[in-house]
Image (cartoon, helix red, strand yellow):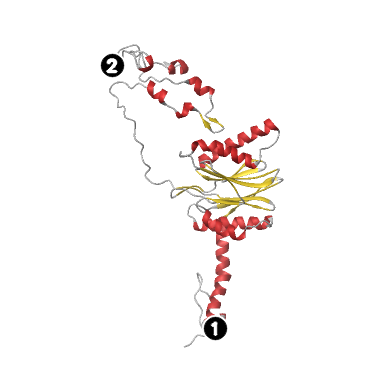
């Protein structure tokens, strides 16, 4: 048979009539003989077609992977085995997941930021994953969706861009990279593939920003935030992002947006990664722990803002100045006026 010829497989049963299904005689479909020397299952696999064609040719899925009629017609079930296909087993719980990624343009280039928490339903699968992935020296991409799909398509895109650079002696533009990725992803529309990438790059036209989704969507803009925490991040970005920002101001806004999103979104958290793409290439800021930022802000608000608000409220109600009382905190008791016997 085909598998025996290709893989040098041994016969399942020797040349004796000891098969549990008895002697098999006659012919299967497509004219393949069936005898006691035949293996238990007979497959016809077009090996030449699989070896000559690539499963991914710029997004065109090979017919060998989409059409399985030629395999099913040559599959022969021995007598006594059920021929019903197994039914899919539903998952015991929804595999919900989320993230917070953002990117925006300013006069110094493109700034991209993301949290580092990878979640699977109610489980934190990885607290230190990298969601901003470098593609080449002047291009990075923020990823949202299934981690395995995002990592695979990042490598595929990086390979194609490197081959383009070797063939033509120049890098493909950011818009061209987004269009290439969109064409490669479009054939998988409607499947379980889940990839949402924001390409942040610098080319001959300057800084540019493109959003590409697994259904083939390609959008160009100046500000994108993707993930379950994006509504909270947009509240900071819409207010603070403008073209004339300095690098320090842009970094501060990106950190603040990711921090606010992780403070409210259960699927985002842990640390924040910040990347800056300019004419000199991309640079990565050191990873920062958002937990420390949270405690610093809580102490600052508890020690200053809340105390001042408390005093203002007392003054408005005519309760006296700070001498009449202090804000109660952990390990302290509320002070009162002069002690009376």
Q: Position of residue 150 (x, y in %)?
A: 53, 41
Distance in Å between CA atoms under marks 1 and 2: 101 Å
Q: Is residue 116 above or below residue 29?
A: below
When asked about the image quadrant of residue 280, the answer is top right
Residue holding disc 2: 22
Query: Are the residues at dot 1 and dot 2 in contact (C-beta closer than 8 Å)?
Result: no
Callout 2 secondary element: loop
Q: Is residue 237 above or below residue 308?
A: above
Q: Earlier in the sequence, mark 1 or mark 2?
A: 2
Q: Position of residue 300 (x, y in %)?
A: 58, 66
Callout 1 secondary element: loop
Q: Nearer the viewer, residue 182 or 340?
A: 182
Judge left or right: residue 165 versus residue 57.
right
Q: Nearer the viewer, residue 66 or 18?
A: 66
Q: Nearer the viewer, residue 340 or 174?
A: 174
Q: Residues within 10 Å of mark 2 (few under 14, many from 20)?
A: few
Q: Position of residue 50 (x, y in %)?
A: 50, 23
When asked about the image quadrant of residue 159, the answer is top right
Q: Position of residue 271 (x, y in %)?
A: 56, 52
Q: How many marks?
A: 2
Does any portion of residue 102 appear in the rendered image?
Answer: yes
**Which residue occupies 69% across, 57% down?**
246
Residue 320: numbered disc:
1
**Which residue occupies 52% across, 74% down?**
327
Does any portion of residue 291 appear in the rendered image?
Answer: no
**Which residue occupies 60% across, 46% down?**
210
Q: Nearer the viewer, residue 62 or 13?
A: 62
Q: Is residue 206 above or below residue 61?
A: below
């Amino acid at each position: 048979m085909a598998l025996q010829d290709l893989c040098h497989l041994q016969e399942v049963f020797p040349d004796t009539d000891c098969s549990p299904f008895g002697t098999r005689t006659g012919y299967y479909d497509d004219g393949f003989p069936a005898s006691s020397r035949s293996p238990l299952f007979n497959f016809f696999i077009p090996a030449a077609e699989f070896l000559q064609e690539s499963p991914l040719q710029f997004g065109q899925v090979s017919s060998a992977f989409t059409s399985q009629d030629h395999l099913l017609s040559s599959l022969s079930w021995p007598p006594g085995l059920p021929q019903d296909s197994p039914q899919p087993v539903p998952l015991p719980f929804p595999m919900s997941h989320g993230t917070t990624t953002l990117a925006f343009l300013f006069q110094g280039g493109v700034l991209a930021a993301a949290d580092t928490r990878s979640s699977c339903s109610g489980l934190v699968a990885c607290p230190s994953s990298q969601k901003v992935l470098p593609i080449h020296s002047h291009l990075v991409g923020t990823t949202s969706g299934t981690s395995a799909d995002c990592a695979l398509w990042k490598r595929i895109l990086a390979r194609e861009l490197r081959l383009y650079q070797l063939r033509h002696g120049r890098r493909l533009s950011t818009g061209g990279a987004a269009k290439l990725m969109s064409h490669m992803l479009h054939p998988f529309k409607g499947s379980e593939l889940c990839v949402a990438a924001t390409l942040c790059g610098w080319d001959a036209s300057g800084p540019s920003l493109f959003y590409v989704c697994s259904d083939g969507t390609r959008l160009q803009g100046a500000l994108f935030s993707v993930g379950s925490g994006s509504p909270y991040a947009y509240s900071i970005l819409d207010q603070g992002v403008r073209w004339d920002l300095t690098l320090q101001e842009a970094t501060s806004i990106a950190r603040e947006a990711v921090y606010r999103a992780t403070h409210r979104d259960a699927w985002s958290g842990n640390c924040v990664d910040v990347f800056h793409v300019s004419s000199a290439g991309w640079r990565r800021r050191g990873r920062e722990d958002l937990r420390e930022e949270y405690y610093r802000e809580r102490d600052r608000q508890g020690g200053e803002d809340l105390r001042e608000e408390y005093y203002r409220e007392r003054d408005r109600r005519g309760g006296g100045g700070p001498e009449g009382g202090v804000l109660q905190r952990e390990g302290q008791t509320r002070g009162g006026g002069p002690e009376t016997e």
